Amino acid sequence: MKSQQPPSQPKSPKPPKSKLMTQINQLTQVVNGVLKINPKERVPKLEVRRSQKDKPETYDLVGDRYILGRSTSKCDIVVQTPLVSQVHAQLVRDRTKKKAQFILQDQDSTNGIYRAKQRLNSVPLRHKMKITLGPPELAEAATIRYIDPPPWYIRTVQYTGIGIGAIAGMIVFAIGYEVGRVPDLKPLPVTQQGPVEVLAGDGVKRLDPTDIANHTEYNTLAEFGKFLPNAVIASEDTSFYWNIGVDPVGVARALVTNVRSRGERLEGASTITQQLARNLLGKTYVGTDDSAGRKWREAAA
């Protein structure tokens, strides 16, 4: 007699690709719930708040695809609220870009996905972006929040830029306020003209007799020749041709020098522009006292 072979068992049909991906992601969620994420790895997270009064639940997004909805059998992230459909939306990681990011896509849900009050079919998620599953006006609408901060060095650059911008804004505001207090200089005050007297170190004895008859007043800078202006600039303000009336490098240098001298003032940082402001407005606005306030008023003028 011939041995009879048992009838072959029918092969179980393969689940559809979408269902297979869902099962894989559900398995990923189970493993993710048991195993700990390497603290050195940056993993995007999704905060899910089922209502405004509930605390958010956080999910680590280590897979490439997640389904959100009310169904416990079809969804990777279950959001059981009345406004959420059985299969409401899906998260898909876009690896075509240099930095892979997640895209939230609506799955023909009844109440849709919203950013602010705008209903969307698809939206690329960015750090701290908040999406509402359903109209945001309704108190029962669930919200999700995507967390994927940039690396520490990018955050350092961002915060540094914000800090510098804030400080610059305050300085501009303070200068604008101070400029409004500067008195009008029209017409310019009449200068005191006369012969130049050269005195000895005691401030009394004249080195040369004053010759009033040969005294000449120059009207323009060109009449002084090219050496005297260059000598004054080299002595008083080497940054004259590029500074904006204030020399920040000179101010920093003078500050360091004076701090090291333990309070003794060894170096100033007034530019020629500031000295002109002191000469023209010394009595009416700038003042003649040796203080930081006078330097500030010189800069504003």
Image: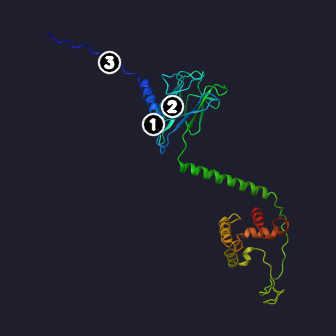
Q: Which residue is mark 3?
A: 11
Q: Where is the C terminus found, in terms of image quarters? A: bottom right
Q: Is residue 8 visible?
A: yes
Q: Position of residue 139 (x, y in %)?
A: 66, 26
Q: Which residue is mark 2?
A: 91
| Residue occupying the point 37% across, 21% down | 14
Q: Position of residue 86 (x, y in %)?
A: 53, 21
Label located before the other in sequence (3 or 1): 3
Q: Which mark is residue 35?
A: 1
- Image position of 145 with respect to 140: above or below: below
Under mark 1, the amino acid is Leu
Q: Where is the N terminus found, in terms of image quarters? A: top left
Most extreme residue toward the left is 1
Label located before the other in sequence (3 or 2): 3
How many numbered marks have been drawn onto this rendered protein structure? Answer: 3
Q: Nearer the viewer, mark 3 or mark 2?
A: 3
Q: What is the spatial separation of the Cα atoms under label 3 and label 1, in whole angstroms?
A: 34 Å
Q: Nearer the viewer, mark 3 or mark 1?
A: 1
Q: Does dot 2 land on a helix, a strand or a loop?
A: strand
Q: Is residue 63 visible?
A: no
Q: Position of residue 77 (x, y in %)?
A: 52, 28
Under mark 3, the amino acid is Lys
| Residue occupying the point 65% across, 28% down | 136
Q: Nearer the viewer, mark 2 or mark 1?
A: 1
The 10 Å Cα crowd at callout 3, few under 14, some 14 to 19, many 20 or more, is few
